[in-house]
Image (tube, rainbow, N blue to C red):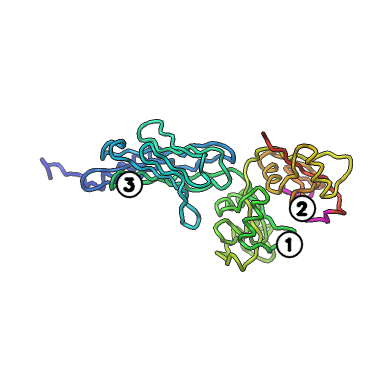
Amino acid sequence: MLCGRTVPDPSFLLLAIYTVALLAGTRSVHVSDAEGGSVVVHTAPEKIRTHRGSSVTLPCRYHSDAGSGQQRGIRIKWSKDSESLQSTDVLVALGEVQKVFGEFGGRVQLREDTEGDASLIMRNLTLQDDGRYRCEVTDGLQDAQGIVTLSLEGVVFPYHPRQGQQTLRFADAKAACAGQDATLASYQQLQRAWEQGLHWCTAGWLSDGSVHIPDPSPQHKCGTSEHTGIRNYGYQHKDDQRYDAFCFTSTLKGKVYFLKTLRKLSYGDAVRACERQASSIAKVGQLYAAWRLQRLEQCRPGWLADGSVRYPIVRPRARCGGSEPGVRSFGFPDRRHRLYGVYCFRKRE
């Protein structure tokens, strides 16, 4: 008691500060020591949604009442969390000195518009940039951190090679997706895709080494299974077990189109026909991205780079292979003797 008034508990004051920050539309972490020095970090509470190839700013602001950042040498660190609970360094800054790591080189920097601005500018986003980022500010013995989630808009698709279904080890699955202009999907990406209608009756790898099946609706169950939703097979042995892959891709840096020709083509002729148009034969991931994100529709089967034959349908109708939108597959026909059209990809300069 002091002059007949109760002195508030310090922990209550910290809770109040945290609550006010949340109501103001930011996520905050407040760390304080017994001597009164403290660091506060504010980050965005919602996911930041964008697409491959774009630029984005991950917001992070800090306040330190322990003294001037210039005098005390405030350290700012950005890192990216992985699904395996490990982290990858993105950028570390101490004063005017900044160090950028690995694949982020030449693409990221601190914004530093005003004092206390630790926001991260990211340019030319790649598929691998999707995920959770951690902004950590250290001032002397005090530090605080906040989380920003970056979510790329895109499409998830199941994939297996010519060798057949359930033939890919984990490393093979990663390589297979990369070969189709994609990356192994995360569980969050698969969850969004399932909610948007992706239903598949075969188990596939995800980026964290787990295996899942996105079971369809009760009207279209997989075999005799009564389960609907995403069935979890858990973490499998990456070198021994074999499954399909669930791949994720995002906005294209170019255009996929069906090449009009006077006659149908073998696979080799299809590759050369695209090259004569200053294009390349399209990859599976590119066709899926064009279908989902650019609304490409073509009721004519065509060769793709992996030797498969497919076509994209936005408005389903009986003569185009079913009652649901999607990318129809003819499998992997004989490359020399079977004749089809071709889908080409022209890269944007």
Q: Is mark 3 on a helix, strand or loop?
A: strand
Label 1 amino acid? Gly
Q: Residues within 10 Å of mark 2 (few under 14, many from 20)?
A: many
The residue beneath circle 2 is 308
123 relative position to 272: left or right? left
Label 3 amino acid? Asp
Is residue 297 positioned above or below 220 on the image? above
Rendering coords of residue 153 (x, y %): 59, 43
The residue beneath circle 1 is 164
Label 2 amino acid? Ser
Of mark 2 and mark 3, the one earlier in the sequence is: 3
- Magenta span includes 227: no
Give the residue at x 76% y 48%.
Answer: 304
The quarter in which the N terminus is drawn is top left
320 relative position to 288: left or right? right
Marks 3 and 1, how far apart at CA:
52 Å
Q: Residue 143 carries which label?
A: 3
Q: How crowded is mark 3: few (under 14 residues within 10 Å), some or many (20 or more)?
A: many
Of mark 2 and mark 1, the one earlier in the sequence is: 1
Is residue 238 positioned above or below 106 on the image? below
Give the residue at x 67% y 57%.
Answer: 200
The segment highlighted magenta reads 321-335
